[in-house]
Image (cartoon, grey):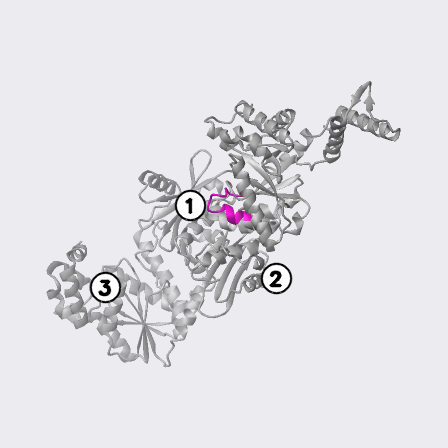
């Protein structure tokens, strides 16, 4: 997937997460995380996001995360939704196995 | 959520709704800033307006919630909707000016404090790192030397007065960093001002010109909706702008002197210089002190040369009248644009 | 005995918190919605949320229904693809007007099942009838597919279609309810009633639930978890019904043990449908106890 624009997905409500994706110049993945459960789950959340991006072979993005205590499946869903939006397409031929 | 609220977007063209919002803001002791393009509002089940938030470019303003509904999660929903609206307009890098008591509410929504004026206003942006990253990029253009000068310039348009200021600074310093304000409300568009500046100082070697950034706070878009009068507004604007300069921008480049021209004609700028002296040295700001160097305005025909004066003459008498006040490059530009656009001139006269 | 589907709790697909927490309730089925409760700008994100929620281990043991967007909308096809792949139990079609709607949906489901290697036919369907046309075509709709487990009434859109409003006594829904019920029974599938939208009015809800139970409906859609218990109680058999059912089952077992071909109780012949019904009553009693 080619990330061509900034995008976002999610909300600030309890149990949810607000994800913003920005394309950046390097090949890195930068994660900026603000979480209400930073102490207990901060690292796990970062690993989860790296994993989600890795499965879709994404690099060169900054992921800004505002977490209000979302479950793993919600975080995955929001990150994937933001990524798809960032490609600026409908992605009708999605690789479902990578989700 | 027990209460059902309906959120909608209200454009400036919806006159009746806009008035409804203005009334709501009035009830909350707030005015409505004129540069707001659209509002997100919330209606309750009785069709009453209970919350609103405005978008003006990349600044979120006039955010108000019905007092008895505060602390119920309505603020969060309003802000989420407001953010979504801004994002859908592809505006992702956002700023908020608000009263200090609202800090917690916005921090919860991913905003981070940039600067404070006690009891009056705070400035926040929706990133923990954007200012830092900007300063890191600036730092890559650091230069060696004991005397590093900084100038912040609007140059509307670039005159021989501006030229003189930059020239003096370059004489006295090992290096000078010149920042151009990206205020879109100027009579001369930013790109043109930048070009004229570059042309006007092309021969000066120890100079770096920095394009405008979000962190030079524009006076034109500075909010006034919750500040009592013009004096306080100006004070707050300067305080925030100078805090960012002293605390973040200057240290990145090692700037230890700030150069300004004395300002005998525009009172606002004169006031600015006075306040600047305070903010550049006060212990209130935890950052190295910066010396303020005021350079006497260059004169022509016994009168100081300033952009004010040039615009004034241009409007009344055309480019010919300002030939002695501007460099060749600016003069050529004025002829091109004066000939082309009469409306430009009449806006200057007005 | 067919699966109990008395209560179907409605969960808006765009609401992350509700999707994460609904496992704590015990309705007979959970219905995740991608259609009317999801804003247009959130159709894509809700689809992914539900796609992942369906695969949560916490939801393994509850029946999962998803209301997708109409197939001819910009979202329907992707909805179906995502949900079938995620292992949804039942796909609920909104606004079903004719048997052809069912067949078209079925074709898509089959396509996806084949693409992703899911057992063909394993994805069941439920049709929501929300218009006058749909009500008229209910008999054909109910018979149109082997995947169909039931048909439901969607009252909000229906009353708009017939140009009236909902009232507490629901007289405006009388014809639609009866038609859907007849059609369902004739086709041997279940009939489901519509949502009672005033989440806080318990009395009103119970009144409506008793009414549709009396009409013969198998279950109802719910928007408030508090309604689950109330509904199950309405559908619970009374002590008398349970007592009678036990007698019938005992009579059937006795006859079977004695090798008799005919079961009789109290001088009357008890044939298979009656025994079947008695078993169903006991099943309900087991699920929700005796009516309080």
Q: Is residue C17 left or right of residue B228?
A: right
Q: Chain of mark 2?
A: A
Which residue occupies the extreme top position in the image?
A: C267
Residue that label 3 marks: B156
Asked whether disc 1 touches disc 3, contact meaning CB atoms under 8 Å apart, the reply is no
- Secondary structure at numbered mark 1: strand
Q: Is residue C210 left or right of residue B345?
A: right
Instruction: Pick the residue in front: C151 or B249.
Output: C151
Asked if both marks, 2 and 1, belong to the same chain, the answer given is no
Q: Chain of mark 1?
A: B
- Give the class, few, some or many, for how many residues have Cα within 10 Å of label 3's Cα (few <14, many ≥20): many
Q: Which residues are magenta?
A: C68-80
Query: Which mark is drawn over residue A44?
Result: 2
Spatial separation of the CA atoms under disc 1 and disc 3:
36 Å
Where does residue B90 sit, x and y in percent of width and height?
40, 55
Q: Is residue C262 left or right of residue B283?
A: right
Q: Is C173 placed above or below A49 here? A: above
Residue that label 1 marks: B64
Instruction: Pick the residue in front: C186 or B106.
Output: C186
Q: Give me the residue at 74% from left, 34% from top.
A: C283
Q: Is residue B165 left or right of residue C206?
A: left
- Secondary structure at numbered mark 3: loop
Answer with mark 1 or mark 3, whichever residue precedes in sequence. 1
């Amino acid at each position: 997937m080619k990330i061509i624009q900034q995008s976002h997905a999610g909300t600030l409500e309890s149990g949810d997460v607000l994800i913003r994706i920005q394309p950046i110049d390097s090949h890195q993945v930068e994660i900026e995380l603000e979480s209400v459960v930073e102490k207990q789950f901060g690292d796990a959340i970062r690993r989860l996001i790296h994993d989600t991006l890795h499965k879709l072979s994404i690099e060169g993005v900054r992921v800004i995360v505002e977490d209000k205590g979302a479950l793993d499946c919600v975080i995955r869903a929001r990150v994937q939704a933001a990524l798809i939006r960032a490609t600026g397409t409908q992605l009708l031929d999605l690789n479902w196995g990578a989700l | 959520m027990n209460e059902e609220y309906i959120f909608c977007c209200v454009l400036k063209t919806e006159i009746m709704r806009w008035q409804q919002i203005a009334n709501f803001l009035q009830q909350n002791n707030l005015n409505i800033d004129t540069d707001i393009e659209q509002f997100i509002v919330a209606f309750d089940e009785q069709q009453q307006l209970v919350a609103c938030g405005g978008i003006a470019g990349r600044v979120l303003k006039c955010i108000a919630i019905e007092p008895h509904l505060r602390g119920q999660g309505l603020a969060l929903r309003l802000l989420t909707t407001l953010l979504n609206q801004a994002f859908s307009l592809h505006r992702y890098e956002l700023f908020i000016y608000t009263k200090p008591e609202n800090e917690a509410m916005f921090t919860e929504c991913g905003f981070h404090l940039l600067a404070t004026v006690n009891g009056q206003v705070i400035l926040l942006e929706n990133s923990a790192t954007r200012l830092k990253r900007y300063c890191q990029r600036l730092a890559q253009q650091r230069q060696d030397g004991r005397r590093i000068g900084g100038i912040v310039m609007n140059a509307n348009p670039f005159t021989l007065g501006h030229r003189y200021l930059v020239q003096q600074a370059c004489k006295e310093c090992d290096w000078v960093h010149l920042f151009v304000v990206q205020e879109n409300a100027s009579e001369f568009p930013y790109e043109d001002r930048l070009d004229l500046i570059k042309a006007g100082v092309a021969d000066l070697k120890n100079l770096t010109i920095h394009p405008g950034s979000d962190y030079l706070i524009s006076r034109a878009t500075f909010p006034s909706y919750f500040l009592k009068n013009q004096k306080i507004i100006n004070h707050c604007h300067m305080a925030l702008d100078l805090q960012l300069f002293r605390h973040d921008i200057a240290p990145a480049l090692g700037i230890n002197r700030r150069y300004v021209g004395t300002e005998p004609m525009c009172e606002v700028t004169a006031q600015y210089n006075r306040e600047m002296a305070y903010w550049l040295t006060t212990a209130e700001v935890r950052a190295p002190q910066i010396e303020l160097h005021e350079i006497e305005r260059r004169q022509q025909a016994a009168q100081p040369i300033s952009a004010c004066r040039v615009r004034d003459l241009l409007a009344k008498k055309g480019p010919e009248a300002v030939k002695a006040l501007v460099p060749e490059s600016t003069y050529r530009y004025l002829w091109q644009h004066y000939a082309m656009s009469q409306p430009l001139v009449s806006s200057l006269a007005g | 005995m067919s699966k109990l589907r008395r209560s179907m709790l409605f969960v808006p697909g765009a609401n992350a918190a509700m999707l994460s927490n609904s496992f704590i309730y015990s309705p007979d089925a959970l219905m995740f919605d991608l259609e009317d409760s999801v804003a247009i700008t959130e159709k894509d994100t809700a689809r992914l949320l539900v796609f992942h929620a369906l695969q949560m281990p916490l939801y393994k043991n509850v029946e999962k229904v998803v209301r997708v967007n109409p197939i001819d909308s910009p979202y329907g096809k992707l909805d179906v693809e995502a949900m079938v792949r995620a292992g949804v139990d039942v796909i609920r079609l909104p606004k079903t007007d004719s048997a052809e709607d069912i067949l078209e949906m079925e074709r898509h489901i089959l396509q996806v099942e084949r693409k992703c290697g899911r057992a063909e036919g394993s994805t069941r369907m439920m049709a929501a009838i929300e218009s006058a046309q749909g009500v008229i075509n209910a008999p054909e709709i109910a018979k149109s597919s082997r995947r169909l487990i039931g048909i439901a009434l969607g009252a909000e859109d229906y009353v708009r279609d017939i140009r009236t409003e909902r009232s507490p006594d629901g007289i405006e829904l009388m014809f639609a309810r009866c038609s859907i019920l007849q059609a369902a029974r004739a086709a041997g599938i279940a009939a489901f009633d519509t949502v009672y939208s005033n989440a806080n009015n318990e009395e009103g809800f119970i009144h409506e639930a008793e009414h549709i139970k009396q009409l013969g409906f198998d279950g109802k859609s719910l928007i408030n978890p508090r309604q689950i218990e109330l509904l199950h109680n309405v559908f619970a058999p009374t002590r008398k019904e349970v007592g009678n059912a036990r007698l019938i089952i005992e009579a059937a077992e006795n006859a079977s043990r004695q090798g008799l071909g005919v079961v009789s109780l109290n001088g009357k012949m008890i044939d298979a449908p009656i025994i079947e019904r008695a078993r169903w009553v006991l099943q309900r009693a087991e699920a929700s106890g005796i009516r309080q």
